[in-house]
Amino acid sequence: DDWWFNVRPSNTEPLLRLNLEAKMKKKRDECLARIEKILQK
């Protein structure tokens, strides 16, 4: 595919770490919005 992501708990802080890569900026922004929506539930 043309994008991937990884979400994991931080080992040093009380938060989640998100890594996201995409070939195109538009795709990255779309995927980030989708992931943020899921994580806010």
Image (cartoon, rainbow, N blue to C red):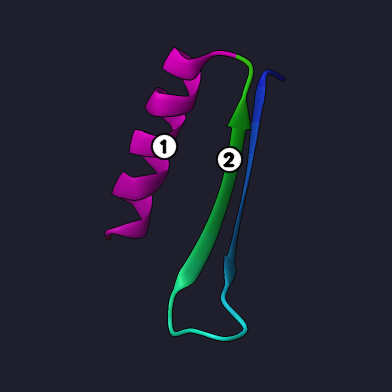
Count of numbered marks: 2
Asked whether, in this view, residue 34 is left or right of residue 28, the answer is left
Q: What residue type is labelled 1?
A: Leu
| Up/down of 29 relative to 14, above or below | above
Quadrant housing residue 14:
bottom left
Cα separation between marks 1 and 2: 8 Å
Tag 2 secondary structure: strand
Main SS type for the magenta part? helix
Question: Which quadrant is the N terminus positioned in?
Answer: top right
Q: Position of residue 11 (x, y in %)?
A: 62, 83
| Up/down of 36 relative to 23, above or below | below
Q: Where is residue 27 in the image (x, y as percent from the top left)?
A: 48, 18
> Which residue carries the number 2 mark?
20
Question: Which quadrant is the C terminus positioned in?
Answer: bottom left
Who's the residue at 39% across and 24% down the image?
Answer: 30
> Which residue carries the number 1 mark?
32
Which stretch appears magenta?
A: 24-40
Who's the residue at 30% across and 46% down the image?
Answer: 37
The answer to if 32 sits in the magenta stretch is yes
